[in-house]
Image (spheres, rainbow, N blue to C red):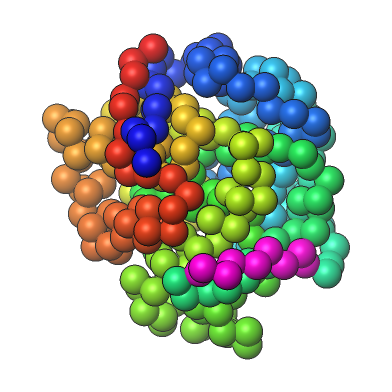
């Protein structure tokens, strides 16, 4: 597989996000789902709707989210929609909770390493293409959160999230989600990411924003403040390459908070998600970083 192209800009502005999308040279067809993180109640680090307004309008997109598998303000459709209203998302955009109503849609993963199916919200069928708009940051379970996590846990339904966490246990409980084999969980994330990437094959693009670099995810109601300075915006048509590029930019950073961020990634074997994803063959870790 030839090197993937990953575009990089140090400029972090709404206009730069649009420029990075245009640099990809793609025109996402039909009805576009913009997958992003709406932010848990109390979280201070998530990217605000005003910042992504220009890019969502550029692709004429609908902001899509899915319910969570843990207690909080996003684990039911009613609460999730209310929080998205409070966070300002519905002020600017059409909103769609993909798993607002069942039954879930099942995406088959015949070559999955540990799971063979992915449960996603059935509303995914309403879209022709997807823009994965990721806030790159750390994560308390995955080590880091980027494009692959958006494709996997992010697009999975509430039930699907628990299914991934419990490595395919149909009856896995909330408590079991936090007691599973870590590497197998990361492989399950790679499996489910591959299913969504295949579903939107050649009709999907990825933009990752490296700002507010906390070791905690936007799903944390109580999150650490950012430990590193902002780095930039990346764009690619390859979800594996863009995650690898983000990780490499962290490792090559001279920022005083770099070691703390890396400790979070390494303590959770975060790179294994990228390793497993490459083995599944829906992208490559070998990339060319092109500064814009």
Highlighted magenta segment, given as a residue range: 104-112
84 vs 229: above or below: below
Residue 192 seen: yes
Asked whether 110 falls inside the magenta stretch, the response is yes
Does residue 81 appear to the left or right of 291 in the view shown?
A: right
Question: Residue 31 placed where, x, y %?
Answer: 80, 33
Question: Residue 11 placed where, x, y %?
Answer: 40, 14
Q: What residue is at 77 percent from the left and 24 percent from the top?
A: 60
Question: Residue 81 placed where, x, y %?
Answer: 78, 49
Number of marks in the image?
0
Asked whether 20 falls inside the magenta stretch, the response is no
Q: What residue is at 77 percent from the left and 67 percent from the top?
A: 104
Does residue 180 appear to the left or right of 152 in the view shown?
A: left
| Quarter of the view holding residue 185 | bottom left
12 vs 245: above or below: above
Question: Residue 73 placed where, x, y %?
Answer: 67, 58
Q: What residue is at 59 percent from the left and 67 percent from the top?
A: 109
Q: What residue is at 63 percent from the left and 84 percent from the top?
A: 170
118 vs 155: above or below: below
Residue 93 seen: no
Q: Quarter of the image for the N terminus: give it.
A: top left
Does residue 33 appear to the left or right of 193 in the view shown?
A: right
Query: Foreground residue, 212 or 131?
Result: 131
Query: Foreground residue, 34 or 128?
Result: 128
The residue sitting at the front extreme is 1
Q: Quarter of the image for the C terminus: give it.
A: top left
């Amino acid at each position: 597989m030839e090197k993937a192209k990953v575009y990089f800009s140090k400029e972090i502005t709404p206009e730069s996000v649009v420029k990075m999308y245009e640099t990809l040279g793609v025109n996402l067809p039909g009805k576009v789902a913009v997958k992003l993180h709406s932010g848990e109640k109390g979280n201070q680090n998530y990217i605000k709707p005003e910042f992504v307004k220009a890019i969502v309008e550029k692709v004429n997109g609908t902001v899509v989210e899915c319910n969570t598998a843990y207690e909080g303000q996003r684990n039911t459709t009613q609460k999730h929609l209310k929080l998205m209203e409070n966070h300002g998302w519905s002020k600017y955009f059409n909103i769609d909770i993909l798993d607002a109503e069942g039954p879930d849609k099942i995406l088959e993963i015949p070559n999955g390493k540990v799971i063979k199916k992915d449960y996603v919200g059935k509303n995914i069928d309403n879209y022709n293409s997807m823009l994965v708009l990721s806030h790159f940051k750390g994560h308390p379970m995955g080590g880091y959160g980027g494009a692959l996590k958006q494709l996997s846990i992010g697009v999975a339904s509430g039930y699907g999230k628990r299914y991934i966490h419990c490595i395919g246990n149909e009856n896995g409980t909330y408590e079991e989600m936090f007691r599973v084999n870590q590497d197998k969980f990361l492989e399950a994330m790679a499996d489910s990411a591959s299913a969504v990437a295949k579903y939107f094959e050649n009709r999907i693009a990825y933009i990752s924003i490296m700002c507010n670099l906390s070791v905690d995810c936007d799903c944390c109601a109580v999150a650490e403040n950012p430990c590193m300075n902002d780095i930039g915006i990346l764009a690619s048509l390859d979800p594996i390459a863009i995650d690898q590029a983000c990780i490499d930019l962290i490792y090559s950073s001279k920022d005083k908070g770099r070691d703390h961020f890396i400790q979070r990634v390494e303590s959770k074997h975060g790179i294994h998600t990228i390793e497993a994803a490459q083995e599944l063959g829906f992208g490559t870790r070998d990339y060319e970083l092109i500064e814009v």
